Amino acid sequence: MDDEKLIRDPTIARSARNELLGRIVHPEKGCRERAGLCADCRQMRLITSDRDSTFYMCQRSAWDKNFAKYPRLHVVRCLGYDKNSPVET
């Protein structure tokens, strides 16, 4: 089963789905245009609510209070930006 189908599978634990979402970035589907720098930042974690809303959480906010936990999107400048290297298959 590919990652896209696993994300939508209700039998998979939420933590496993979030882990998959954190690995998948689809710039061709508008992710970069919607989220800006957060789309490919190593500190970003995608969070999915019970109502299937998706939020971009900045993990850096856990130890550095200068960063918002859920930044306003479209982020165009960020001192904590850490470009995520592409996932190798």
Image (tube, rainbow, N blue to C red):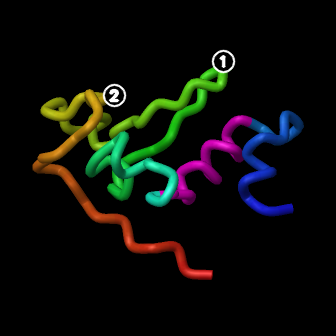
On residue 7, the disc is none
Q: Which of the two residues, 29 or 19, is positioned nearer the viewer here?
A: 29
* Residue underneath mark 2: 70
Q: Which of the two residues, 39 or 31, is positioned nearer the viewer here?
A: 31
* 62 to the left or right of 21: left
Where is residue 15, by image quadrant?
top right
Identify which residue is drawn at 17% across, 50% down. Answer: 80
Assign a secondary structure to mark 1.
loop
Identify which residue is drawn at 51% across, 52% down. Answer: 29
Q: Amino acid at mark 2?
A: Tyr
Query: What predominant SS class does the magenta segment belong to?
Result: helix
- Which quadrant is the C terminus positioned in? bottom right
Give neighbour class at mark 2: few <14, some 14-19, many 20+ (Cα, 10 Å): some
Compared with 78, 41 (above or below) is below
Identify which residue is drawn at 18% across, 30% down. Answer: 65
Where is residue 76, by image quadrant?
top left
**Percent position (x, y) of residue 17?**
69, 44
Give neighbour class at mark 1: few <14, some 14-19, many 20+ (Cα, 10 Å): few
Circle 1 or circle 2, nearest the eye: 1
Q: Amino acid at mark 1?
A: Arg
Identify which residue is drawn at 50% across, 41% down. Answer: 46
* Residue underneath mark 1: 51
